[in-house]
């Protein structure tokens, strides 16, 4: 066995042991481990203006101030944060991102190297245009979560109005370079809005051609002025009546992993809602956290659900076992969701863990652990249209492709 194979085998074994411990902990309410993955923002600066973005869209009613956009992570503090989270046990993966583009950080490769030195699975969420492809290959970044949002130049430019055809061509060239170099772990991400809703099959074919490991679709979560780019009723109807099924058939014919079953549930949520979270449950409080550039610690990726603030006297490990986090875990465990939960950004992950918990502990216990067996259970927010049935949710969960490692 080569050293690389041995490292991977050790990671897989640790992952399985951690997963068993977490599944048991969901039933007991204990918290034996720290998060499995953390999402660390390293910059608020961005090189683009995606129309759906809550921070940089040209449609925002109140643009972010320049002082906010200039904030970025300090490398020494980044490493201290990693060490503290790792000390809790169970940390397997780090997602490096930002409310901007991580590759605009002048010391980004130093930050990525710090993650790799700890033997952690490294994902970078990126639009890729500010990145140095050679350095990504050299660092062996495990996964790039590539925000492409288009399969044609026209849709790409509509989604990114300040970019040009030259940028689209440069992106395609870099993706082809990665494919030729043998990268097979990257994932294509498409946030679906009115500009790209008709391109699902083309997006799937693009991902397969470029040897992506997976293609994920997410209905755009819209607010603060970005609502103007939401899909319209006709687009939603076309997706539901046949386009989605055709896209799934094409993905499966190409052997490409996808999340189209979860995307179908998002379409069923109705209105501005994008996630029927009350039918699935929230598990992120035991699995995940996000830390913003200014040290704000979030329960999940939702910037409105804050559990604390890092400073000279407050470490992440203290907050993880602290009263705010504990109270939020218990609230969501009872099915008492927050209004913003109707646009859950971790819906795919919650869907996956919901099925795991259901399989491990049975239907009755699953209903209790997702708050559906309590009098407190409530939907995240009212939506238009009929919500998906419990059978539809269960069927989608059974069809999910569950990877061994995130």
Image (cartoon, rainbow, N blue to C red):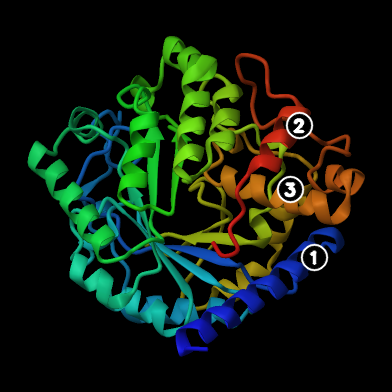
**Which residue is depicted at the point 77% across and 29% down?**
391
Disc 1 crowd rating (10 Å Cα; few below 14, some 14-19, many 20+) is some
In the rendered structure, the answer to whether residue 134 lies left or right of residue 317 reads left
**Foreground: 232 or 82?**
232
Vertical arrangement, residue 144 with respect to residue 238, above or below: below
Crowd around label 2: few <14 · some 14–19 · many ≥20 (10 Å): some
The residue carrying mark 3 is 355
Nearest to N terminus: mark 1 or mark 2: 1
Instruction: State whether residue 349 is above or below residue 261.
Output: below
Is label 3 in a helix, a strand or a loop? helix
Residue 406 percent across, percent down from the top left: 54, 61
**Earlier along the polypeptide chain: callout 2 or callout 3?**
3
Please identify the residue farthest to the right as the structure is shown. Answer: 364
The residue beneath circle 2 is 378
Q: Report how far apart the C-alphas of labels 2 and 3 lie in the structure.
A: 20 Å
Between circles 1 and 2, the one closer to the viewer is 1
On residue 25, which mark appears? Answer: 1
**Residue at horizontal 39%, vertical 30%?**
200
Residue drawn at x 14%, y 36% as measured from the top left: 162
Q: How far is the residue under mark 1 from the one under mark 2?
A: 24 Å
Question: Please, what secondary structure does the residue beneath circle 1 have?
Answer: helix
Q: At which x and y percent is residue 315?
A: 54, 75
């Amino acid at each position: 066995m080569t050293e690389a194979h041995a490292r991977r085998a050790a990671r897989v074994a640790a992952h399985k042991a951690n997963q068993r411990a977490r599944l048991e902990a969901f039933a007991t309410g204990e918290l034996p481990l720290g998060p499995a993955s953390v999402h660390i923002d390293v910059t608020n600066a961005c090189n683009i203006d995606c129309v759906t973005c809550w921070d940089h869209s040209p449609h925002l009613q109140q643009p972010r101030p320049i002082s906010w956009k200039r904030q970025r992570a300090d490398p020494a503090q980044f490493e201290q944060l990693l060490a503290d989270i790792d000390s809790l046990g169970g940390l397997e993966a780090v997602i490096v991102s930002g409310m901007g583009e991580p590759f605009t950080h002048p010391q980004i490769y130093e930050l990525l190297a710090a993650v790799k030195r700890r033997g952690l699975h490294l994902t970078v969420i990126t639009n890729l245009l500010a990145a140095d492809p050679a350095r990504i290959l050299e660092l062996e970044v495990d996964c790039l979560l590539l925000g492409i949002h288009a399969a044609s130049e026209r849709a790409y430019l509509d989604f990114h109005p300040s970019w040009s055809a030259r940028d689209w061509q440069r992106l395609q060239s870099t993706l082809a370079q990665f494919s030729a170099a043998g990268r097979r772990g990257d994932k294509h991400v498409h946030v679906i809005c009115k500009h790209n809703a008709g391109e699902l099959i083309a997006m799937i074919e693009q991902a397969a051609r470029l040897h992506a490991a997976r293609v994920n679709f997410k209905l755009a979560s819209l607010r603060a002025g970005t609502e103007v780019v939401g899909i319209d009723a006709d687009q939603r109807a076309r997706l539901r009546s046949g386009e989605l099924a055709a896209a799934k058939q094409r993905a499966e014919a190409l052997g490409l992993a996808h999340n189209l079953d979860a995307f179908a549930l998002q379409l069923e949520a109705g209105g501005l809602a994008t996630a029927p979270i009350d039918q699935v449950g929230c598990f992120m409080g035991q699995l995940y956290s996000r830390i913003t550039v200014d040290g704000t610690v979030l329960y999940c990726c939702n910037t409105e659900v804050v559990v604390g603030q890092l400073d000279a006297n407050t470490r992440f490990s203290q907050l993880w076992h602290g009263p705010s986090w504990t109270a939020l875990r218990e609230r969501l465990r009872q099915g008492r969701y927050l209004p913003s939960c109707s646009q859950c950004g971790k819906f795919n992950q919650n869907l996956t863990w919901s099925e795991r918990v259901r399989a491990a502990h049975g239907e009755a216990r699953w209903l209790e652990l997702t708050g559906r067996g309590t009098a407190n259970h409530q939907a995240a927010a009212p939506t238009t249209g009929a919500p998906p049935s419990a059978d539809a949710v269960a069927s989608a969960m059974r069809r999910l492709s569950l990877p061994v490692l995130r």
